[in-house]
Image (spheres, rainbow, N blue to C red):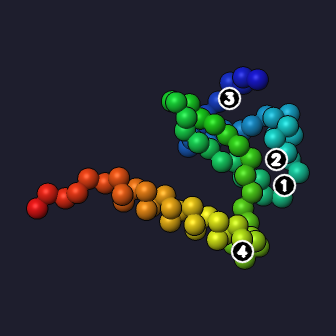
Amino acid sequence: MTTTLPLSKRGSLTLPPEMRRRMGLDKLPNPLVLVEERDGGLFLQAAVAMPVRDLPKEQIEAWISRDEADMKAFNAAKPAKKG
């Protein structure tokens, strides 16, 4: 579905009620939308904010392990400094 929405001078836009319902945003007390720039366009996705203390410890550990592995691969790919 494609919809044209007006953008205010402050950069705000309003999602139509039927779109908010389809995304489940109408059921949330404080709805959030994740906006990602992709190929010159914007991708909107419903999001949830949650205190870190409510996340399972295993999930946090998995994220840390993934980040550490990504950083190790990044550092290994960096060219050596000329000195």
Q: CA distance from mark 1 to mark 3?
A: 22 Å
What mark, if any, has residue 5 been given in the picture?
3
Quarter of the image for the N terminus: give it. top right
Mark nearer the N terminus (1 vs 3):
3
Residue 32 locus on image (x, y percent): 72, 52
Q: Does dot 4 land on a helix, a strand or a loop?
A: helix
User: In front: mark 1 or mark 4?
Assistant: 4
Circle 2/circle 4 CB separation < 8 Å: no
Q: Amino acid at mark 1?
A: Leu
Q: Nearer the viewer, mark 1 or mark 3?
A: 1
**What distance separates the C-alpha of mark 1 from that of mark 4?**
25 Å
Q: Is residue 1 left or right of residue 8?
A: right
Q: In the rendered image of this protein, does residue 26 appear above or below residue 72?
A: above
Q: Are marks 1 and 2 in contact (CB under 8 Å)?
A: yes
Crowding at mark 2 (Cα within 10 Å: few <14, some 14-19, many 20+): many
Check disc 2 and give the amino acid type: Leu
- In front here: 28 or 62? 62
CA distance for labels 3 and 2: 17 Å
Neighbourhood count class around disc 3 (C-alpha, 10 Å): few under 14, some 14–19, many 20 upward: few
What numbered label is drawn on residue 44?
none
Which residue corresponds to mark 2? 25
Q: Which mark is residue 28?
A: 1
Under tag 1, what secondary structure?
loop
**Picture residue at 36% right of the left edge, 59% below the top:** 75
Q: Secondary structure at mark 3?
A: loop
Q: Which residue corresponds to mark 4?
A: 57
**Left or right position of 28 against 57:** right
Q: Is residue 47 left or right of residue 28?
A: left
What's the residue type where badge 4 is placed? Lys
